[in-house]
């Protein structure tokens, strides 16, 4: 297989003796592994490698995948930090999306378009997006739950009841 790879999560730790990968899953991505017995692991610049899983189960806030006995333990030992990926695009929903899915959406405050999301990041508290306004300037906007009315991927909009903005570094230096 070759093509565009979509992140499911990252291998945060391994247990080589059990051939177990503990995976930190991006929000809304766990369903990409549900019911499957194969996973793709991408380490560094290498192409993703497909591994057969004996089991994939929920474990704490992530997933645990136990690979079949044919996978060398030394190979499992090198997988910490590798990405778990899929070639199948995962359609975002308002409750299950990756932060990168926000890029390209229009951010509006009380029905007034403020700009298009050009970058997004996760913080411990909530997501933060960078928008480009119609005049070309940029600003950072926190997407705290109490500020967001709706994220609608069907219409391509983030509707907020209040959108506090901080000029972004790109705007300040430009």
Image (cartoon, rainbow, N blue to C red):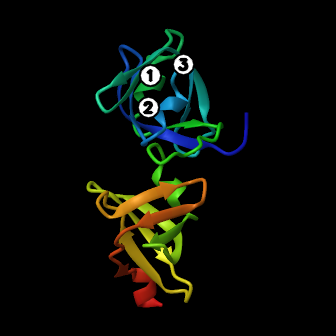
What residue is shown at x 55% (from left), y 86% (from top)?
Answer: 136
Percent position of residue 39, x then y:
55, 26
On screen, residue 58 versus residue 93, left or right, reads left
Foreground label between 3 and 2: 3
Q: Circle 3 is placed at which residue position?
A: 35
- Residue 164 lies, with reference to residue 85, above or below; the image says below
What residue is shown at x 46% (from left), y 32% (from top)?
Answer: 30
- Residue 92 lies, with reference to residue 67, above or below; the image says below
For the residues labelled 1 and 2, the Cα–Cα distance comes to 7 Å
For the residues labelled 1 and 3, the Cα–Cα distance comes to 27 Å
Contact (CB < 8 A) between labels 1 and 2?
A: yes
Instruction: Specify the label residue 78 is tagged with.
Output: 2
Q: Secondary structure at mark 2?
A: loop
For the residues labelled 3 and 2, the Cα–Cα distance comes to 26 Å
Instruction: Specify the label residue 40 is tagged with.
Output: none
Q: Quadrant of the N terminus?
A: top right
Q: Circle 1 is placed at which residue position?
A: 74
Specify which label sits upstream in the sequence, 1 or 3: 3
What residue is shown at x 56% (from left), y 84% (from top)?
Answer: 134
Q: Quadrant of residue 86?
A: top right
């Amino acid at each position: 297989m070759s093509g565009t790879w979509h992140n499911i999560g990252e291998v945060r730790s391994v247990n080589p003796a059990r051939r177990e990968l503990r995976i930190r899953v991006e929000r809304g991505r766990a369903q990409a592994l549900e019911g499957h017995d194969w996973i793709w692991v991408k380490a560094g610049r290498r192409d993703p490698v497909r591994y057969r899983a004996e089991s994939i189960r929920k474990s704490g806030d992530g997933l645990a995948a136990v690979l079949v006995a044919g996978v060398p333990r030394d190979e499992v030992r090198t997988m910490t930090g590798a990405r778990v990926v899929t070639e199948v695009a995962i359609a975002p929903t308002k409750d299950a999306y990756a932060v990168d899915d926000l890029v390209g959406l229009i951010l509006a405050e009380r029905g007034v378009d403020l700009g298009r999301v050009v970058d997004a990041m996760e913080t411990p508290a909530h997501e933060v997006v960078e928008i480009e306004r119609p005049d070309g300037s940029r600003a950072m906007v926190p997407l705290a739950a109490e500020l967001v009315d709706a994220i609608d991927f069907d219409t391509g909009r983030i509707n907020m009841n209040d959108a506090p903005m901080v000029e972004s570094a790109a705007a300040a230096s430009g």
